[in-house]
Amino acid sequence: MRFLSLALAVFAAIAPMRAHAQVVETHRLTEEQSAAIRDSPHRTQLRITIWYPAVPGASEQPILIGPEAHPDFIVGTAAMDAAPAPDPAEGKRPVILLSHGFGGSARLMGWFGIAMARQGYVVVAVDHPGNNALDPMTVPGALLTWERAADLKRALEAVLADKVIGPHIDPRRVGLAGFSAGGFTALVGAGARVDFARFERFCAEHRDDGVCKPQAELAISVEQRKAFFEDPAYAETVRHMGDDHSIPNVRAVFAMAPAIVQGLDPASLQKVSVPVSIVLGTADTVAPPDTNGKVAASLIPDALLQILPDVGHYDFVADCAPQTEAPVCAWAKHQAEAHDAAINAASRLFQSAL
């Protein structure tokens, strides 16, 4: 593990140089069979959000979450459904697959996706079925964590087949990025194996750990988790928990405040062979660094760990709007610092690896 701890005072000095290229946001639907068991109305659809460099002259507009007059989150700006910019001289564009946190959404991570698209990447995000802020949350959506990597894989396949976007993507240059449970997803997509029994053993001894407590987005008790994994209706899906769910052609992983790390097999983390960069905050009580991000960084060969003083878990979601009543915003106090540090670290990683 390579270790890097930065004081907040230096963030301005290292803030990334942001390109002035315009960015497109567009949306697609595809089918993912595993979605049906997780989605509340049992749909097989998977919603995809894509950001990519726009053709010159495209007109951007504000991207907000919540009512326009009183939004909860300010995501950024993007042109809706505009044409892609011409490919750069060096060829097609690399792609970054982006996974949101527990009960989040693709757009809630749009601040990161838009920033990466301004730097020339195509960014593909999903709303994980049964585990997103737009639909009813479900117990299968919360607990079938390994299926989240399948969502990213299926989204990439769909976007590569898309007649507008696919021709601009180099399928041999894939990066993974994610926040919280999305950081866990990115590690699984890079070859880490899921071991939920290990997670349960950890939580039996550490009930006060943030990842073991019932989550605000959907509270699931120990008894509910036990009943779910013993339910014959889910036995076939659960049987594949520890399979290899890696995504082809992944060259790098960027994880923001990764959670549920105790649910990963340590030996599999030691075998992750691509560059990994982890950014987290000292004030994170939801995915405490000592039992999550630091553990992953200590096991993954040559992982780069960046620890941000005073930054909390929800500092890594989209900017909280003034006077918002979104519950997570009560804990988001250092978003500018967290965003700048994450964009800067991701830029270094993906520029070198992709």
Image (tube, rainbow, N blue to C red):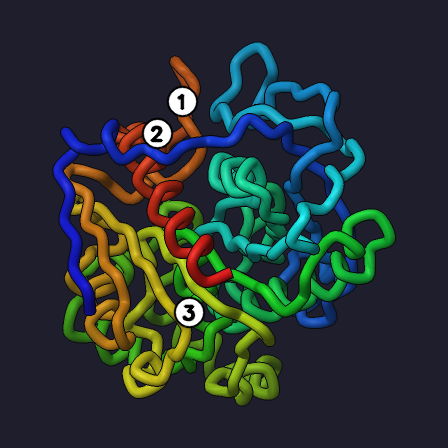
Residue matched to label 1: 325
Residue depth check, mark 1 versus mark 3: number of the one nearer the observer: 3
Query: x and y percent of residue 150 in the render?
Result: 61, 70
From this viewpoint, is residue 180 visible? no
Identify the residue at image location x=19%, y=72%: 298
Outermost residue, front side: 89
Mark 2 closeness class: few <14, some 14–19, many ≥20 residues within 10 Å:
many
Tag 3, which secondary structure? helix
Q: Which comes sooner in the sequence, label 3 or label 2?
A: 3
Tag 2, which secondary structure? helix
| Between 348 and 194, the one nearer to me in the picture | 348
Residue depth check, mark 3 versus mark 2: number of the one nearer the observer: 3
Mark 3 closeness class: few <14, some 14–19, many ≥20 residues within 10 Å:
many
Identify the residue at image location x=62%, y=57%: 129
On the rendered structure, is 39 left or right of 16?
Answer: right
Amino acid type for the residue under numbered disc 2 = Cys
Quote the CA–CA distance across marks 1 and 3.
Answer: 32 Å
On the rendered structure, is 62 left or right of 2?
Answer: right
Q: Which comes sooner in the sequence, label 1 or label 3?
A: 3
On the rendered structure, is 33 left or right of 187?
Answer: right
Amino acid type for the residue under numbered disc 1 = Glu
Identify the residue at image location x=75%, y=31%: 55
Q: Which mark is residue 329?
A: 2
Quote the CA–CA distance across marks 3 and 2.
Answer: 27 Å
Q: Which mark is residue 187?
A: 3
Query: x and y percent of residue 188 in the render?
Result: 46, 73
Amino acid type for the residue under numbered disc 3 = Leu
Q: Is residue 282 above or below residue 303?
A: above
Q: Where does the N terminus fall, quadrant-wise? A: bottom left
Identify the residue at image location x=72%, y=62%: 42
Query: x and y percent of residue 20 in the render?
Result: 55, 26
Q: Are marks 2 and 1 in contact (CB under 8 Å)?
A: yes
